[in-house]
Image (cartoon, grey):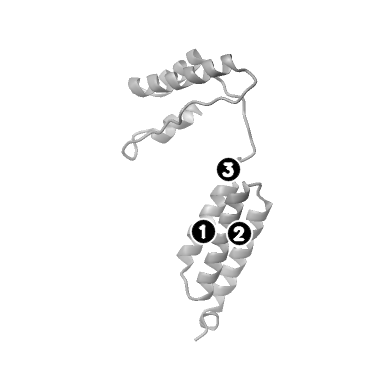
Amino acid sequence: MDNSSANPQITQNSLSEIEKLRSQLQSAQLPANLHDKALQQIERINLTLKYGGSLAQLDITAKYIDWITNLPWNTKTEDVLDINKAKEYMDKNHYGLAAVKMRVLEFLSVLALQKKQNPTGNFHAPNLFFVGLAGTGKTTFAKSIA
């Protein structure tokens, strides 16, 4: 039995959504390997829907494509490595968390020293990862740092 004749509305809507995803992906400036992987996801969901897959899978892929195409892949900003300003900002916006704040200030200090020693070169410090239960402020703290 052909699934497209059983419910032509779902097939037509899903094909339209797949075309939107392809268009959105094509217009985005993504790293080449990510573009290829996202295109594979779209093709996989297209085949899945042709052979009776659920629209929930399409929704997951659409959210993923939307997320990666809206990230500022080619945008760079100048880092502000002012330790005193960072401490003042964190103290103003986040109560407690002394150990976390100290680690962030250490992180910024390493970046500031690297930049001072090599003002024209690339520099970086190790990544920071915030771990904890849901609702403990990891995301808002990271946004403050950013």
Residue in view at x 59 percent, y 59 percent: 39
On screen, 57 above or below 26? below
Q: Is residue 96 visible?
A: no
For the point 56% across and 62% down, the residue is 42
Mark 3 in CB contact with mark 2 (< 8 angstroms): no
Between the C-alphas of marks 3 and 1, the distance is 16 Å
Task: Identify the element where label 3 is drawn.
Answer: loop
Up the image or down, 115 lies above or below 36; here it is: above
Disc on res. 143: none
**Reading the chain from its start, which is encountered first: label 1 or label 2?**
2
Horizontally, is 46 left or right of 56 in the view? right
Amino acid bearing label 1 = Thr
Sequence-earlier tag: 3 or 1:
1
Residue 92 location (% of width, % of height): 43, 19
How would you rate the neighbour count of disc 2 (Cα within 10 Å): few for under 14, some for 14-19, many for 20 or more?
Answer: many
Q: Which mark is residue 21?
A: 2
Which residue is denoted by mark 1 in the rendering?
Answer: 61
Residue 116, percent from left and from top: 57, 14
The percent position of residue 29, horizontal first and vertical second, equals 66, 46
Amino acid residing under circle 2? Leu
**Mark 3 / mark 2, whichever is N-terminal:** 2
Residue at the right extreme of this rendering: 27
Residues at marks 3 and 1 touching, judged by CB atoms closer than 8 Å: no
| Spatial CA span between label 1 and label 2 | 9 Å
- Tags 1 and 2 touching, CB below 8 Å: yes
The residue tagged with tag 2: helix, strand or loop? helix
Q: Residue at x 52, y 15 (%)?
A: 113
Q: Which mark is residue 71?
A: 3
Residue type pointed to by label 3: Leu
Q: Secondary structure at mark 1?
A: helix
- Total marks shown come to 3
Spatial CA distance of label 3 from label 2 is 15 Å
